[in-house]
Each structure stands twice: as structure tokens, then as C-alpha cells.
Image (cartoon, helix red, strand yellow):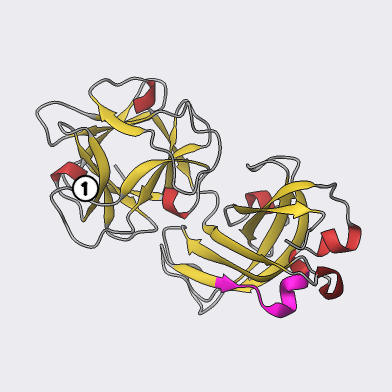
Amino acid sequence: MVSQNGVNLQSATGPNVVLRMDGGNCSTTTGAGCGTVNSQFGAGPWEFVNIVANADGTVSIASVHFPNVFLRINGPGGIVNCQWTAGPWEKFTLVTNSDGTVSLATTAFSQVYYLKLDPSTVTKFNPAGWNTVSCGTTLDSTAKFSIIPAKQGMAVSNLALTFDRAWKTNNRLFGHISMTITNNTGTAFPASGSFTWVSLDVYASLQSSVNANMKKIGEVPANLGQLAAGASFAFKVPESNENDFTKRVMEKGYLPSGNYYIYVQSRDPDNPNPIDGRGAFSSTSFQLPPTDS
């Protein structure tokens, strides 16, 4: 088994439903484990993992966003959460199923337990994730996963906007635009050099998920510097670029009235196709036409 970096563990029966690991409160090894493991609709920074090949033939599932945090299963206790560093309860057999999917089976207990994810109620993004992850002794459809290579390595999250009450005068809808950009490529980005530029493509949609009807409404550049694997950069759009964030809306006004979601994706400036570019979507909502409240 060769380690795989920057991948998603996606439910085999729930397209776009992936394993989520929140290791924010993990800083030392504890008997009860730490953090939260659940599911998410769509992949952002907390949904990227490394599949680490151990010397004994097992694998461990490491969070990309939270270094040294691993997937933990307490089979007899029925608990799935995180742990700081990898011990016996953080090691698994990666089972290849006849249908091409994979399953994670514990090796630390007298009985084998499988990681399970029920995607049936996960239909949209939830900031806290969805509590649909468990473990059990049967290898059924909820215990089957697909390993999805990371198409997009620079993920955008924590998008925050402030409505500009003087939007007509300032020719912009928002000011104080900020977000977090995380390197999920599994290696330093760029591999050499001290900085990198990415383009931040801005889209609007009436739907709360990425879809084909999204409209591009702006684009701004971002200088990230060099980011280590798993590192994050708090980016604030310079005031000089805030007009560009929603430039197409202000110039063309082609969006009908409604409650919209804004999506921001980081992209390699040299890649003409933003959907396949380096990045992941993050959204927040706004209303057109704007109101002063």
C-alpha cells in the first residue's frame, strides 16, 4: 500500500457526501479521543485526508487541515472521533471490495468493526457537518467508500462579507471581504519559490450547492506566499480590488431578484477552466436587489 495524500473518502452511495474531520481541540493523546468525525456535503479543508501506509501493512487516516490528527474508532464503544497521533485504534485494514469500493476495518479488537457513513439525509452543506458517521460489524453499503483524488488543492472557506450601504456610490456590493485559503495538495505550494498568485473566481447562484447554472460575477487576485502542506492563509481582499469582487453584477445587472449564494474558488491564473482549477468552493448568501438592512 502506497500512501495517498490529499484525498476525500466519499460515500459509495452518496455522491458528494464525504468524511469530515474536525480536530480543532486535539493537542494531546487522550483515552477518550478528541475532536469530531462526521460527514459533509462537498469537500472543503476539513474533508481532505491523507491515507498513511504503516509499516505493518495497515493504514491510518490523517487530517490534512489538522496536522497529527487521525481517525479513531472505538469499536466496542461504538465511537468514531479523532486522536492526537496514531496508535492501535487509529490503524485499519483497507479492504478492496468486489465492486471497486473500499472499506476501513479495525485491527485492534477481537471483532472487526467498519467505518460507516449514511448519506441518506445529507443533501446540502452544513457548517458543523452531519452526524451520520458510525461504526459497525457488518460490511454493508454504508461501510463502502470511494477514494477521490483531490482535483482542487487550494480550498476556500470562512468567506465573510460586509454589505456596503453606499454601494451605489462606491460601485460595489461588499467591503471588508475576507476568507481562508488552505493548501490541501499534500505538499508545499508552490514546490519552490517564496510566493504564488492565484485567481479568486466569484460566482452567484440561487442554489445552495455548486451547479451548472452558476454565474460568474467577479474575479480578484490573491498573493498567498508559499504555503506548507495543510497550512492556511487568512486573505482579505484589498480595498482596491473590492469593486472587482462583484464587478459583473454592478456593470451588467444581469442577475434577477432573489436570495443568492456567493461561491469563491481559487484557481491557477493560467488555467482557462475555473471548475477544474486549483480550489474549492465556499459560500455565503446575499439578496438582490440589495437592501440597506
Residue at image location 41% in from the left, 62% down from the top: 230
Q: x, y percentage for residue 167? A: 81, 69
**x and y, in percent, of residue 265 in the image:** 63, 57
Is residue 4 something that shows in the picture?
no
**Circle 1: residue type:** Asn
For the residue pair 67 and 102, the one nearer the viewer reads as 67
Q: Which residue is mark 1?
A: 54
Q: Is residue 40 above or below residue 204?
A: above
Q: Is residue 101 left or right of residue 123?
A: left
In this picture, which residue range is highlighted in magenta?
235-243
Residue 262 figure quarter: bottom right
In this rendering, position of residue 146 left or right of residue 143: right
Residue 16: x percent and y percent? 53, 36
Q: Is residue 96 left or right of residue 204?
A: left
Q: Residues within 10 Å of mark 1 (few under 14, many from 20)?
A: some
Q: Which residue is painted at 46% across and 57% down in the image?
A: 184
Task: Give the residue displayed 75% in from the left and 52% down from the top.
Answer: 287
Q: Secondary structure at mark 1?
A: loop
- List the single residue furthest toward the front: 293
State the residue in front, 280 or 164: 164
- Tell me if residue 219 comes above or below residue 85 in the rendering: below
Which quadrant, please, contains the C terminus?
bottom right
Q: Residue at x 13, y 26 (%)?
A: 111
Can residue 277 be seen at all in this image of the molecule? yes
